[in-house]
Amino acid sequence: MWSQTLTNPGRRLQQAPGGAARQRRRRRAAPLVGRFRYGYVSPAVLLVAVLLYLPFLWTVYQSFTSYSGLGPMTWTGLANYRTLLHDPYLLSAIRNTLLWVAGTLVLPVALGLLVAVLSYNLPHGGWYRLPFLLPYAMSGTGVAVAWGIILEHGGIANNLLSAIGLPGGGESFLLYAPQNSIAMIIASTWQQLGVNALLFVVGLQSIPREPIEAARLDGASGWTLFRRIIWPLLAPLTTVVVGLALVASLKTFDIVWVMTQGGPGRSSETLAITMYKDTFVADQYGYGSAVAIFLTVVTGIVSWLYLRRQLSSRRAIGA
Amino acid sequence: MRSRLMSGVTRRAVLIVMGMIWLFPVYLILVSALRPADSFDPSRAWVPSAHLGLWSNIAKAWSASQIGQSLGSSLLYAIVAPVLACLIGALAGYAIVVLRLRHGFAWFMIIFGGTIFPAQMLLIPLFVSYSKANLYDSRLGMIVIYTAISVPFAAFVMRNFFTGVAFSMFEAARMDGASTFRVFRQIYLPLARSALTAVFILEFTFVWNDLLFGLTLTQSQGTRPVMTALAALQSDVYAGTPVPIALAAGLVVSAPPVLLFLVTQRYFARGLALGQL
């Protein structure tokens, strides 16, 4: 128990000042953790700072300017952000992005967990997971063509719905909002589920057997065993999967780009698509940057709120 | 023992039914890539063609796009960058969780913060600064950006994986006189084998399938990754290249990640991780 409390960095952060001072003294006295420990974290920090944070600062600057890619770049202050507030397309992009966040958390994450739990201790479980990983390796064109065949007017989804007597069999699924976003969320689930399943499998494998055996001896089984023992022990990797899904869904770009490019009109644009089109299609680099900053700030706040809660309140049970 | 979530038979049945649903779009891609180039009809795409066109499709794609030349570059990027990212991410996770950096959560958030930027936002700044730093159109430049973009994911997975490892192991090894690096290399890295493998294959596939940075930061045949060659071929699916040829090229290019999935299956067998310790 004692060691788990120590390995939990979040709990240390919440300690009273006295606790921190005590820890400082102890570290000076007995450098169990070594003197070089900041050296271990610095390659990661340096790479990320130079290649990802500096371009972000650049974009922050660009968002206060007006620039068309040619000619002079002029300082316009907050003008881009004022435009942002009154942009009707931004509103629909926000709505679509929220749909992606909700859909991604429900479908690929939950189904990925299901596949992982069903397969992780089956003999040859890897072969049962392979069909879910294959779509992740498919190229964008493959995804667009396959799902086009399924979703277009007179496509497989239409025929299927008519065959079982459900409405909606008349036209393409990619024509109107919000059903075009929902259809693409399903296609994205097809592509992403295997990734989540794989990460959950890693989590399930790292669960020690003793608590599970003990719970079994006490008579726990099935849903109770999962809910009370496996689920809490799986928490570290669940946080990874949900955290990544949250961030990735806010930045949804690729699959929308290959399937509808945000259309028809601008009805299926997500924030990342809006940003890309404003910047590179409409050549409004300043305004596109402002959209990028908006998206980045939202993503940053959301992931900070989620991870702060998850990583600091974790009851690290185990070993 | 009947105390599993469901019996083995039920679990297999559910997985097989779901797997078949998942394979259906893959099947559509396959039969479309297999048919002769001029016989693609979206409304009857699921009916396999009686004639096999795969080899001639691949041959046409190969000569039209010079995919061959860029395969080597892509392999280099997709192996080196994820390996570096796994190591750098594991080191960071180890420092934060096991060596208990002060303000560990802040350090972690700085690294994880690298994932919140939309990749499209990075293109202009990277293009301009790569040109100035002589990294534009170089293999080194591509490895550096792919490594940087892969590090946050690796650090996140490794950080959380290491929270599940008993701290007493670290203490015991340190009491025996092992250096912190030796503990990392001989205890923590081997323990994390399945996590590292998962991170590696996911990042290999990510780098392999990336188009954005390849298009923006490279120019010559010797540095361009394979996806750019594929995209040049596929971007005019609706104008020029017949769909079966584009899909056949896509299949060839998807082969390395698929092979990797197959080869690494055994690393995810039950019991390789902490369970046995």
Image (cartoon, grey):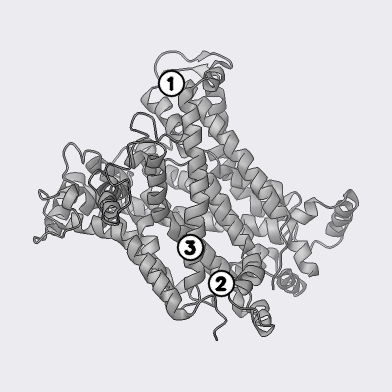
Dot 1 corresponds to which residue?
A284
| Chain at numbered mark 2 | A
3D distance between C-alphas at marks 1 and 2: 49 Å
Q: Which residue is drawn at 40% across and 50% down?
A: A186
Three-letter amino acid code at the position of disc 2: Gln
Identify which residue, B15 or B207, lies in the foreground.
Answer: B15
- Label 2 in the same subunit as label 3: yes
> Residue at label 2?
A205
Q: Name the residue under label 3.
A: A197
Q: Can residue B131 be seen in this view?
A: no
Dot 1 falls on a residue whose secondary structure is: loop
Depth check, front residue: B52 or B100:
B52
SS assignment at label 2? helix
Mark nearer the N terminus (1 vs 3)? 3
Discs 1, 3 touching: Cβ within 8 Å: no
| Residue B249 image position (x, y, % from top left) | 23, 52
Tell me, yes or no, if residue A314 can be seen here. yes
**What residue is rendered at 20% in x and 57% in y?**
B46
Separation of residues labelled 2 and 3 (CA atoms):
12 Å
Residue shown at 34% from the left, 50% from the top = B73
Residue B265 appears at what percent x and percent y?
42, 71
- Tag in front: 1 or 3: 3
Label 3, residues with CA under 10 Å away: few <14, some 14-19, many ≥20: many
Contact flag, marks 2 and 3 (Cβ < 8 Å): no
**Which image quarter holds the C terminus of chain B?**
bottom right
Quadrant where the N terminus of chain B is found in the figure: bottom right
Q: Which amino acid does label 3 sit on?
A: Ala
Q: Distance between the residues labelled 1 and 3?
A: 40 Å
